[in-house]
Amino acid sequence: MVGLATALQLLRARPSLAVAVVDAEDRVAAHQSGNNSGVVHAGVYYAPGSLKARLCREGRSELIAFAAERGIPYRQGGKLIVAVRPAEHPRLDDLHRRAEQNGLEGLELIGGAELRAIEPHAAGDRALHVPETGVIDFAAVTAAYADAVGELGGTVQLGWPVTALSRQGKGWRLASRGRTLGARAVIACAGLGADRLRRLAGAADDEYRVVPFRGSYHHVVAPADELVRSMIYPVPDPRLPFLGVHFTRGVGGDVHVGPNAVLALGLREAPAALRFPGLRRLMRRYARAGAGELWRDNVRSAFVRQARHYLPELTAGDLTPGTSGVRAQYVARDGSLVDDFLIREGDEAGEAHAGDERAARGSILHVLNTPSPAATASLAIGRMVAERAIDRFGLR
């Protein structure tokens, strides 16, 4: 999504550019872009002033307008962030203040009776109602981005995995299974493959490493799917790295619950991630939480118990296995999760700095950490990246 959104924004800003998007898969949205919750986020959780906070709000508006233009269904039913015990009340108040700072509209702290007027079957004695949260089919959005790129004169080349990336004169040469492509500048939006492309370009930076986390969902089957009208979310624990299990009614009316968060050890990126000191520090820091996630991933009854904290009427028979997605999450060498979006400029000679003539001649920009809400913010991220590329690389 981010790569196509960047190509789209480049072509909107500079229609004369020759822009090609290459993708290793034979279809768009084969991975994280098409396997996610489908939630269009309003911007509750993100630190005020961060890229996430700003671009989520900007991107949400652009995404909704784009969907309307393209006839892509979008539903804005809002969500409840539910406190199920008094100890969560202060964190709920903090979320409310943060959301107000981020410019969200229509926010309301409500009690148990008001909560159940919105979600009759939800547990909890207090909640934050976020009416601006919505749902959409992000795979359909990604396909529409690809169509829009083509309409503006760009090309999308599928089945084109980049196997080599090297300097060629003032630009770059990309290779893929006997095919080559020359480019004045390269923007890499590769998700889990971002580190590999950085290595192909000659970067030796070991400050961060991409780590694959798998998140699995369950579908709530009829008639239990009527227990959820829109979205029921937990109050996040700031001591833990991920949000936790939540319920979402998708744009097509299906209800899913999840995801959990476990290391995706079967992927080719996993061995390099496990060798990275930052991941080992992260695993030690969150050993108990990680063990709990792994337990709930493998023991169905444990997952159901977690879900029943928020929907007490739910039973194991109400769930069937759903989709899984892999989150490309960057981890820093000190063991902390990289929280904000992360974009780096550089080439095989090292990181490029302001005024560096190499960048003006044609360098490379790596879009690295783009976890949630990157899908919501994709057009805003794409515009920011496109503007940076135009400025840094002299694209006219």
Image (spheres, helix red, strand yellow):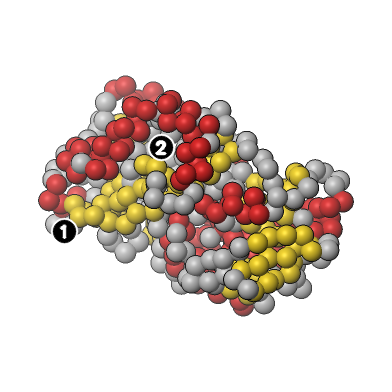
Q: Which type of secondary structure does the marked residue at label 1 adopt?
A: loop
Residue under the image location 43 percent in, 40 percent down? 107
Q: Is residue 209 above or below residue 381?
A: above
Q: Which type of secondary structure does the marked residue at label 2 adopt?
A: loop
- The residue nearer to you, when weighing 224 against 396, is 396
Quadrant housing residue 109: top left
x and y, in percent, of residue 172 in the image: 75, 63
Do labels 1 and 2 touch, CB within 8 Å? no
Would you say residue 118 is visible in this rendering?
Answer: no
For residue 222, the mark is 1
Q: Callout 1, which amino acid?
A: Ala
x and y, in percent, of residue 389 in the image: 74, 56
**Counting residues from the N terminus, which is met first, the one under dot 1 or under dot 2?**
1
Tell me if 335 is positioned left or right of 200 in this view: left
Residue bearing mark 2: 242
Q: Callout 2, which amino acid?
A: Phe
**Foreground tag (1 vs 2):** 2
Q: Is residue 210 above or below residue 239?
A: below
- The residue nearer to you, when weighing 122 against 379, is 379
